[in-house]
Amino acid sequence: MKILCIGNAAYDVTLPLKSFPEENKKVRLDYPKVECGGGSASNCAYLLAKWGLEVYFAGVVGDDYYGQMIEKEFKSIGVNTKYLEVNKDVVTTSSYIINNTSKGTRTILTNKGNNTFMTKLDIEDEDFDIILFDGYEYEFAKEAIKKNPNAIKIIDAGSLRENTVDLAKKCNYVVCSKDFAEDFTKEKVDYRNVRTLMKIYDDLKKAFTGEIIITLEDHGCFTYSDGYKLIPSIEVENQDSTGAGDIYHGAFTYCIASGYDLLTTMKISNIAGALSVTRIGGRYSIFELDEVMTKYKELDAK
């Protein structure tokens, strides 16, 4: 299986604190800062390479320190950087993450230029089997679809944007966040009333032809497969939720590439995403494949 991940590449600097900082105060970090690559499609590519698949990443970084670190990190794990554009006219997207370790929550401050997009849109006839999008790099994504009409297409629909909606209409799997689902349908999820999820799912299904999966953070994920299915997450001690959604999408793509059925794919992806919040830093939160599968087999045996 040859996989192409298209979208955002960023560099993350996580600042762990036991509580959110008070304004206009000096604060000492409780733990050392954590630095690593980030970005939705970028994290997916990293996971897929770590889990042993052939994966390419398409996106843009600047010709600067953060861009160099992202490229170095990709190459160290085995991501093919043929379509990673290094552009001296842009500044690499960076995110500064305040991680409240007492709650496992995070606040992300992102520095991304308005024109931080790929300019080289040529893509060779690579015969990719799967293409994953995160809604960024829209023009390159359209070229990839055109050149690979038979590829399985998966979208990480994290937030509601026009380009994300357009790409989602072309995908076999629309894996969307609760925020995207609510904003698109103008409905609200009420976890005490599963019918709200059913209504949102039905509205999404009218708009998109692919399989619809709604991710619900620590509540798990929701779809329809021989009936409406809410796949619960697992209980973990939450340290840092940075990258958990990206890791879910990476694991989802791995499972589809490996031939798992939809519900099994969602269960494994839940586990990968949930385990990730027990560690600080997005890339450092990606567990080994055998650790995730061992946990899945333990739960499946119950």
Image: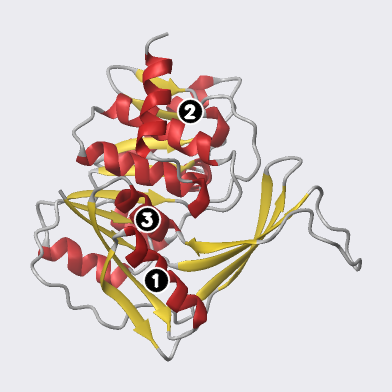
Q: CA distance from mark 1 to mark 3?
A: 12 Å
Position of residue 122 measured from the top left corner of the image (x, y, whole percent): 18, 78
**Residue 46 bears which disc, if any?**
3
Q: Secondary structure at mark 2?
A: helix
Label located before the other in sequence (2 or 1) = 1
Q: Amino acid at mark 2?
A: Leu
Quarter occupied by residue 292: top left
Determine whether label 1 and label 3 are within 8 Å by CB: no
Q: Amino acid at mark 1?
A: Lys
Q: Amino acid at mark 3?
A: Tyr
Q: Pointer 2: what residue? A: 197
Quarter occupied by residue 51: top left
In front of the other: 272 or 93: 272
Q: CA distance from mark 2 to mark 3?
A: 31 Å
Position of residue 29 measured from the top left corner of the image (x, y, whole percent): 79, 59
Q: Secondary structure at mark 1?
A: helix
Label 2 crowding class (10 Å Cα cut-off): few <14, some 14-19, many 20+? Answer: many
Q: CA distance from mark 2 to mark 1?
A: 42 Å
